[in-house]
Amino acid sequence: MRCPNPPHATLQPLRFISIEAASALALLLAAAAALLWANSPWRGSYEALWHVRLHLPLTAWLPPHELQFWINDGLMTIFFLVVGLEIRREIHDGALSEPKAATLPLIAALGGVVVPALLYILLNTDPTARRGWAIPTATDIAFAVGVLSLVGRVPPALRVLLLTLAIIDDIVAILVIAFFYSHGIAPIGLAVVVAGVLLVLLMQRLGIRAALAYAAPAVVIWYGMLRAGAQPALAGVLLGLLTPVRPQVRGVRDAPVTRVQALLHPYVAFGIMPLFAFANAGVSLEGLDLSGGLPLTIGAGVVAGLVAGKPVGIALATHAALGLKLGTLPASLGWRHVWLLAVLAGVGFTMSIYIADLAFDDARLLAAAKFAVLLASGLAGILGLILGRLPRSRAAPASRAAL
C-alpha cells in the first residue's frame, strides 16, 4: 500500500517554496532596475540593447533574432522546463496525485482565471484590446510566495496550498498560450516535434541517464515548436512532462524529475527569471498614455482583473467547492487564509508580462499592459501584506478536514 504522503513529497515543495521566496527579491530588483533605466536619460540604450540581432553559431536554420527573442523564447524554455518538472512531480506523488486533494485548488484556480478574464472583457469591447484577456489570469509563484514569506508565521498548509494553486494556474496559462496565442500549426513543425519526442523516449528506453545528452532532442523539439507556429518556450513544459518520475538506477533515491529540477531551479529563480524581468519590465513612463482610448481600458482591465477579479474569483470558487462538498480545507486554515491566498494570487508579473508580449504588437498597448501588470502586482502584494499582518481572529477554521 503506497504511502499517500512520501517524505520527499513534503520536503520538495518546501525547498521549492524557499527558493521562490528568495528569488522574489531578485525579481523585484531586476524590475526596478529596468524601470529606472527605461526612464533615465539613457533610455535609448535600454531599448537598443534588447533589439540587438543575434545569430547564434548553432542555429544555422534560424535567421538572426533580437536579444529579447532569445530571452523570451530561448532562455524561458528552461523556466517552462522547471514548471513542467514541478507539474510532473506533483501529478505523480504531490498535491495533484490525489483527486480529492487537488479538487479544491483546481476549482479555486479556475475561478481565479474565469472571473478576471470576464472582468477584463467587460471593460474592453474592442477586438484588438480583447486580445489581452488572459493577462490578468496568471499568478507569479516567486512574488506571491515571496510576499507570503514577509507576512510572518503562517500555517505550512497555506504555503503548500498557494504553491498548488499557482502550479494549476501555470498549467491553465500554458494551455491558454498554446491554444489562443499560437498562430496555427504547421505540419512540418509538428513532425519535427514528434521526432524530438520519439528521440527522447528512445534514449530513455536505451537507459541513457546523462541529463546533458537530452539537450539535442530538446533543441529539436524547441525548433519544431518554432516551425509549427507555437510558442517555442512551451517545449520546456513538454520535456518536463516526459521526464521519468522514478529512479532509473536501483539504490538511487532521487528520480530524474527531482534531480533535474533541483539542478535547474536555482539558475531559473536567480538568473533566468530576473533577466526576463530586466528585459521586459522597462516601461517608459514618458511614452505611456493612459488618458483615454485602448491604453486606458487595457490598463483598467488588467488592474481590475488582478486586484479584484483574482481574489473574488478564487474566494467564490472556494466557497462553492466547500458548499458542494467537492473539496476541503486543511484543518489549520480558515477564511482569513483563503482571502490572503486569493489576494496574493493577484500578483501576476512574470507570466502576465509574457502573455502581454504575445497579445500586443502595438508599442503603446504593450506599454499600457505592462505598466498595469506592474501596478496591479504591486497593489496585490501590498494588500496581501496588510491582510496577512492584521490581528489574528480567534474564529474557528472554515474546515477541519484535511486537504
Image (cartoon, helix red, strand yellow):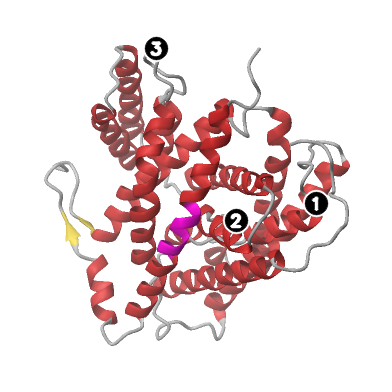
Q: Pointer 3 and pointer 2: residues touching (CB < 8 Å)?
A: no
Q: Is residue 39 above or below residue 371?
A: below
Question: Disc 3 versus disc 1: distance between alpha carbons?
Answer: 43 Å
Identify the residue position indicated by label 3 in the image. Answer: 250
Q: Is residue 78 above or below residue 40?
A: above
Residue 307: percent from left, percent from top: 65, 67
Span highlighted in magenta in the image:
20-27
Placement of 8 over or under 287, stated as above or below: above
Quadrant for residue 212, please give it: top left
Disc 2 residue type? Answer: Thr
Q: Amino acid at mark 1?
A: Gly
- Residue at point 60%, 58% (across, down): 148
Q: Looking at the rendered structure, which numbered label has been put on residue 334?
A: 1
Q: Read off the residue under disc 2.
A: 137
Q: How much space separates mark 1 and mark 2, taking CA atoms?
A: 24 Å
| Label 1 neighbour load within 10 Å: few <14, some 14-19, many 20+ | some
Q: Main secondary structure of the magenta part?
A: helix
First reached walking from the N terminus: tag 3 or tag 1: 3
Look at label 3 and name its amino acid: Arg
- The reply to whether residue 232 is visible in this rendering is no
Label 3, label 2: how far apart the Cα atoms are? 43 Å
